Image (cartoon, grey):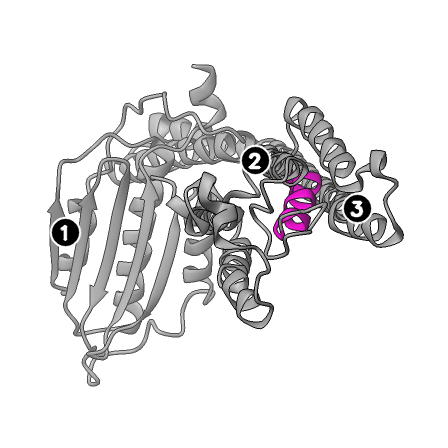
Amino acid sequence: MQRPLWRHLWDTPRDAVFDVVLVAVLFPLGPILAVFFPPDVPPQDFRWLGGEWVAQAVLNLFTLGLLVRRRYPVVLLAVALVMMLVHLVAVSTGTGALFSINQHSDPWMPGELPFLTYAFAAFETRARWRAAGWVLVAAVVFTALRPWTNPDGETLNNAVWVTAFPALLGLWTGARRRLVAALRDRAERAEREQHLLAEQVRTEERAKLASEMHDVVTHRVSLMVLQAGALGVTAQDAATRRAAEELRAGGCQALDELRDFLGVLRSGEQRPDVVAESALPDLSELVAESESVGVPVRLTELGESTAVSPAVGRTAYRVVQEALTNVHKHAPGSEVLVHVEYDADRVRLAVRNTRPDPAGGGELAASGSGAGLLGLRQRVELVGGTFRSGRTGDGGFEVGAILPGYVPTAEAGSG
């Protein structure tokens, strides 16, 4: 994105407004003073310069230079010093005052000088330019004091308040600004470190939880799978063997899902460069199961079926499965739309049912733990997705999720 033009001159809009208002106030100040204090300089004294209007034009341009005083204070200080020296030479040689309404104005200093010395001391941070700037400030103070002429108290007072004091004030302001910036940076760095420490603690807790789940659950499910396999071998009738095989297959699937989610818990890094090798599980079986019990389901899929990691695929499958189960329980007689949309790096799911039939049976509504949607939300957020659920405007209900295309696991990272 292109940087705004005003950002090249000012850091904040407040700085820009201040400088613009300052120039707007100082610009007409010279003509106004000339009206209330008529000049005692004859017009012919400006003839060698090209006329009085030339001197006024130079002063006006110098006043406009205040708009860049925060970025180029050293350059403006150099211009101010040249103007003071030229005016000094003109007065000393009898030519006349060039930039002052008073013919005997000696020494003369531009009215913009306090704002320049302050801006230099407060805003200039480049070492080379600061060294040159302090030389210019010293030269300006020396020229304003005119020590070779035995300056009186008024000259000394004007020189101090117009040149030296603004520079000292700018030094204090710049040091304060740098201190505030350093404190702010330190606070932000401490906050980032605290966030990193909290993330490290969460990662360690997740790894500990994964280890405990592995020790407790995997052992028991593995025994169940082995016992189901043994039962399938030794059973005499076909029905028992078939049931044992279904039990064994379900246990193996549970072990696969557990391994995927243990990998998600153990992994704290995003590795988008690893390409997943499995696609979203086939949802047509869930649709067929719902239609077999009298629930009409329409499945729509948009986009190309991109490859997703196993953890994401099973999470998407569980979202649709739980949503259809809730329709069976709480929305008998309704129609269901399952919408799946494949993007380049994510999978979008939505399961929406229409208004249920009030006359439908509600025997299953009281079954279950009542925490199905909460469990889905936690499962979706575990893989880095977003989950939503709620009633629709037509009296139905919608469950939706947006899942990333790939979620790293410990197994995937080591494979």
380 sits to left or right of 10: left
Residue type highlighted by circle 2: Val
Provide the secondary structure element on which disc 3 rests. helix
Q: List the residue tagged with mark 1.
A: 288
- Magenta stretch encompasses residue 117: yes
Amino acid type at circle 1 is Ala
298 above or below 332? Answer: above
First of labels 1, 2 by sequence position:
2
Residue depth check, mark 1 versus mark 2: number of the one nearer the observer:
2
Please state which amino acid type lies under the numbered disc 3. Answer: Trp
Q: What secondary structure prevails in the magenta region?
A: helix
Q: CA distance from mark 1 to mark 2?
A: 86 Å
Q: Which residue is mark 2?
A: 79
Magenta residues (range): 111-123
How crowded pointer 3 is (Cα within 10 Å; few <14, some 14-19, many 20+) is rated as some
Q: Is residue 195 visible?
A: no
- Residue occupied by mark 3: 172
Visible residue check, residue 37: yes
Question: Which of 76/342 is in front?
Answer: 76
Towards the viewer: 212 or 136: 136
- Front label number (3 vs 1): 3
How many residues crowd around disc 1 within 10 Å: few (fewer than 14), some, or many (20 or more)?
some
